[in-house]
Image (cartoon, grey):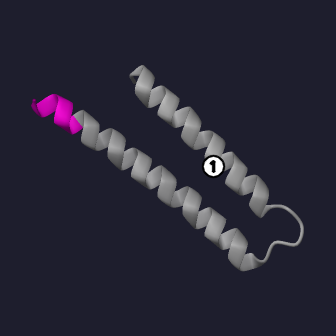
Amino acid sequence: MTSVEISMTFALLSVAITLIARARRPGRTDQERKQARTAVTMMFTFWFGAILLGKIILWTS
């Protein structure tokens, strides 16, 4: 992994941890918890897709 990919991974992890921590606070509804889980899942899916697309572009050029 390049330094850009590593820093992007750390940034994504920090945002994911923040979202999960907020969702676990008392007083949150089940819907808010589900939305946080969905957001984290989508973030990791898009991150993986971006890394994969970047690798494909680099390999083919």
Q: Residue at x 56, y 62 (%)?
A: 39
Q: Position of residue 9 (x, y in %)?
A: 51, 35
- The answer to whether 46 appears left or right of 21 in the picture is left
Question: Hey, which residue is sitting farthest right in the picture?
Answer: 26
Amino acid residing under circle 1: Ala
Find disc 1 in the rendering and name its residue.
16
Determine whether 60 is above or below 48 in the image: above
- The answer to whether 47 appears left or right of 41 in the picture is left
Would you identify the image quadrant in which residue 37 lies?
bottom right
- The answer to whether 43 appears left or right of 29 in the picture is left
Question: Hey, which residue is sitting farthest left in the picture?
Answer: 61
Q: Which residue is drawn at 26% across and 43% down?
A: 53
Q: Where is residue 11 in the image (x, y as percent from the top left)?
A: 57, 37
Determine whether 33 is above or below 4 in the image: below
* In magenta stretch: residue 57: yes
Q: Position of residue 44 (x, y in %)?
A: 49, 50
Q: Which residue is drawn at 57% across and 66% down?
A: 38
Quarter that holds the C terminus: top left
Quarter that holds the N terminus: top left
Q: Is the magenta stretch mostly helix, strand or loop?
A: helix
Q: Where is residue 48 in the image (x, y as percent from the top left)?
A: 40, 46
- The answer to whether 43 appears left or right of 37 in the picture is left
Q: How many labels does the image show?
A: 1
Magenta stretch: give its range: 56-61
Would you identify the image quadrant in which residue 3 lies?
top left
Label 1: element kind: helix
* In magenta stretch: residue 1: no
Crowdedness of circle 1 by 10 Å Cα count: few (<14), some, many (20+)? Answer: some
